[in-house]
Amino acid sequence: MDTSATLWWDSHKDCLCYIEQTLLPGEYRIIECRDVDRLATAIRRLEIRGAPALGVAGAYGVALAARTSPHTDFSKVMTGVRQAAELLRSTRPTAINLGWGIDRVLKGLAAARTSDEVRTISLREAENIAAEDTACCHAIGGHGAALLPDRCTVLTHCNAGALACSSWGTALGVIRSAIEAGKDVKVFSCETRPLLQGARLTAWELARDGIDVTVITDSMAAHFMRAGAIDAVIVGADRITHDAVFNKIGTYTHAVTARYHKIPFYVAAPLSTFDAERNERDVVIEERAREEITIMGNRTYVTDSAKVKNPAFDATPMELVTAIITEKGVLRQPIDTRSHLSFCKSH
């Protein structure tokens, strides 16, 4: 399987490189990002997306700000780094990993005393986060693979694969690890309206790896569940509070439908996605542009006089989740994210 990185620092060019996801599957292009404003635009435009990938991007963004600062004075470099950090933090309000990655690098910079140390420490910490993300995804994959039958068909929503991380993936990491372990796993990938991350990205990733994948529209999932064609649902997460899982809009629908059809509904996510101190009601759900729904290609499908709502995420109540698969193991019902986080931090 191709497990190459999708987001990385090029030490020779001294810049952040990433696969431009909005162009897939029609065009595969690597972007060389050399300033924080360009990175912020990339995150807003979903050129870089997926919770773990946003954490890595946020970390690299802090390093990028440090390395491109025009100043030599330590205090001025740090002021610019903090301003860049807040700019990046503001780009996606719902996904917690972005702020987590930024804050971890900023915390590491508390040890810096010179401008050179700011540049060195920030990049080193960002590289550590990227490496840990890859190891984390493999650990999630190993724990999750054990939950799948030897022969099964799994439904996914949006993209929680290598493109959403630094490599391997969370939900798709479970599928990759299961196949690597010798299991016969097929995938139904929901197209994931309105931006079609399932059709464009998940299907591209899996097909590239030679994994059996079938794309269906979001509204077909219940039909195939009722027909007995789906054995499990696995999704990623952008934020997990103690009472809900926030993921791409449409996830809640699959959770309700899976519960009705007695199909396990799994969430694969790193501990960095947990926000156990907040409730569902505390989280701001990002509202995206009208044009994402009204326009496809060069054609407008909604009359200008009609209103449009476009929330990027929804919240799935914790009681609908069969288990959460983390790098430290599987959290089963009754799910207590606060206790799980406390246990993991103490071991």
Image: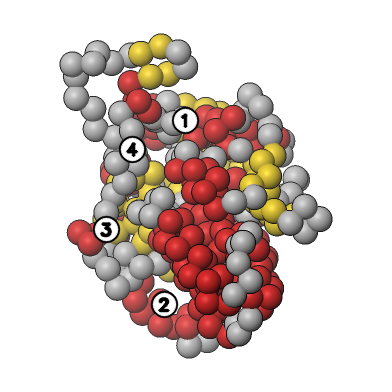
Using a 10 Å C-alpha cutoff, classify the residue at mark 4 as few (fewer than 14 neighbours), some (14 to 19) or many (20 or more): some
Sequence-wise first label, 3 or 4: 3
User: Is label 3 or label 4 in front?
Assistant: 4
Q: Residue furthest bottom?
A: 346
Q: CA distance from mark 1 to mark 4?
A: 14 Å
Q: Nearer the viewer, residue 193 or 179?
A: 193
Q: Does the residue at mark 1 contact the one at mark 2 (Cβ under 8 Å)?
A: no
Q: Nearer the viewer, residue 186 or 108?
A: 108
Residue 205 visible to the viewer: yes
Q: CA distance from mark 4 to mark 2?
A: 31 Å
User: Is label 1 or label 2 in front?
Assistant: 1
The residue singled out by tag 4 in the image is 288
User: Is label 1 or label 4 in front?
Assistant: 4
Residue at left offset 81%, top offset 55%: 12
Sequence-wise first label, 4 or 2: 4
Q: Does the residue at mark 1 contact the one at mark 4 (Cβ under 8 Å)?
A: no
Indicate the amino acid at tag 4.
Arg
Indicate the amino acid at tag 3.
Val
Where does residue 221 sit, x and y in percent of width and height?
Answer: 39, 32
